[in-house]
Image (cartoon, rainbow, N blue to C red):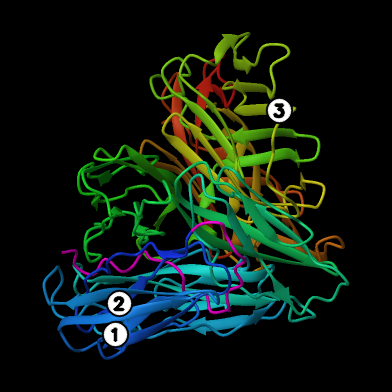
Amino acid sequence: MRDFKTFMLVGLMLFSASIAGAAGTFRFLTESLPDGRPDNLYVAQILTANGTGPVGFEVSSGTLPTGILLDSQTGSLRGVSTEGGSFAFTITADDGNSVIGIDLSIQLTNSGTGSGAGPTFTNTAFADGRVGVAFADTLTAANGVGPFTFGALRLPPGLRLNGQTGAISGIPTESGSFDVNLSITDAGDSDNKGFTRISILILPSASDFAFTLSLLNNGEVATAYQSTVTTSGGTGLTVRYAASGLPDGLTMNPETGEISGTPTRAGTFRVSLAASSGGEILSAALPMWIVPSASSQFLWGFFGLPIANAGVLYDGFPEVVLDTQNGSTVSYSVRGLPEGINYDSTTGELSGTAMTQGLFPVVFTAVDSGTGETVTLAADFPVLPAAGGDTNALTTNLWVKKQTFNSAKGAWKAQYLYNADRSTGAAFNPATQAFEVTLGARTISLAPGELVESKGRFVFKTPKGVLPAVAVSIDPKKQVISLSTKGDTLLDTTPGNFANVMFLGDRGFKLYEFHDVKGKFAAALGFRSTAFVMTAAKIAVNGGGLDTMSLALLLADPGFTYTPGVSTLRIRLISQGVALIDRDFTSLGTSKESVDKKSSRTVFSLGNLTDGDPVDTISKFSYSSKKGKLKLAMKNVDLSALPTGEDNLTLELTIDDQTYITNVTIFESTRLGSYSTVMP
């Protein structure tokens, strides 16, 4: 039996469900519950499919362990029990049309890793927040030794977590319901770690507009599906709904919020929802399970991953396993894990030590050889610094220069700028590696060999007359990717947040972006996650400590803040593990603040005073948070340690308490000592 597999299950959002009828049979998908340990947080989810209305849950007989409670609206089990043993009970589910029951049990034992009771969060809920109003709450822990390191995934934009104190603070910039993954690591006992999920409700600045649902209905491949999203408190006469990332075969009616259709692919999906009324826009992301058939119960048992810390052993979370339920002989595979993390193809166990921080998009696949059934799961694998914090501060080295998504016209056009290792032997090779890009539910996937070289670029184009007409161009010299589709079937609706995922071989990038009602994305205020890329570099190695460097960068951070004279400004340029430049220029920073009329966001314009330091001199620093453009030039630096030919550099730029990191390859031109980002 699995020891305390509780930390990846969903359904902890604390508002009522509203689920419309489906054509299939109302039934339980859950057949068993994970084991746990006394004095440790227990979280599990009971899943049903094909409900005809809001589903209510109750314990009809037997007894839950003392301290573990059933949420009657969501089917979640949560709490800390001090008693061990086996506890049997019957759960009934009522969808308003019929009542079904299932016998379940929970085993609580002291087996497993860690010494004694592991750390548990004492938080069970967060205070509600409001856009534009300062938010403050604190994570606290019981048990364990301490001190603790905290981590968070999917905090509302504008909020930050202090990984050492547990303090969550900031000014929310987006309203909606945010399901936050939380991890805790006990420095006093590295084998003891914990994980939970708590939702945060952020209300609009001037109303109580909010979703009135907790879970989407779950469904089956080839069975008609229906589920309705609802809201309350809107200020407009009507509400418009939108959904992105629905399973294949499902669409949303933007006028009614009804999701319907017939699913064609099995797996666990994270659906981005949006609702707009009177100029106010809500967002949420909810899970949905689709099993392979009306007779199948083969599904992923988890949704969400414990948060890793760079350089810290990932083991220690009670059995870090991402596997399935109700299969027979199952094999597992994954794409996109960070370097240092391993995935056992037989057991689904995750282990190892991640060395590079970032938010890594990963796709897990499980195949049941006994039935031939396959289920997939796309998820975020977060790797925070060793000191913890939150994923809002992690940088993605991908920039959306422009993007439009028009479902009515069946057209998607985009241009991206990226940073990746382009050095010899490490660069993306389309002859042997695949390319894939996803926006919402639409994926363009090109197998090795489909992109062909043409005039220094890699290009793909569907034959004339074939629909959808897809064109892709990758220019590795300039780090530019362009794509377009025409005559396409685009099922996502707008306005709302979209997940944009790209794979260049095994190198994954993931951004969250807001698209308006016309499907347009506007950089830089449209980013809902942090993006940071270097678009150009000019370096001249003149010798004698008189080298020069000029960088053009793009930076978007939804939680960006800056206070002149107080907020840190610092640059580090690292080559092969050695810092060639490490300069703090906090005292030189200047700033102007204003409010963007369209988004009502506070925006910053940064600059620098004249630098009187004769070494590592700042010639120019400028940044506009509205457009994302950043320029940094230095003189009187010593870059003589740069290797000839090429080098994959690491740039660390610290503004306020956030450090933005990108890795970019520079190449020496025919003029010795002259480097740029342009590949020869």
The quadrant the N terminus occupies is: bottom left
The numbered mark at residue 624 is none
Marked residue nearer the N-terminal end (3 or 2): 2
Q: Is residue 253 left or right of residue 457?
A: right
> Residue 3: x and y, percent?
19, 67
Dots 2, 1 in contact, CB < 8 A: yes
Residue on which disc 3 sits = 484
Task: State the CA–CA distance, disc 1 to disc 3.
Answer: 52 Å
Marked residue nearer the N-terminal end (1 or 3): 1
> Residue 388: x and y, percent?
39, 65
Task: State the CA–CA distance, disc 3 to disc 2.
Answer: 47 Å
Q: Is residue 219 left or right of residue 129?
A: left
> Residue 65: x and y, percent?
25, 86
The amino acid at mark 3 is: Ser
What residue range appears in magenta? 1-24
The quadrant the C terminus occupies is: top right
Query: How many callouts does the rendering have?
Result: 3
Residue on which disc 1 sits = 80
Q: Quadrant of residue 586?
A: bottom right
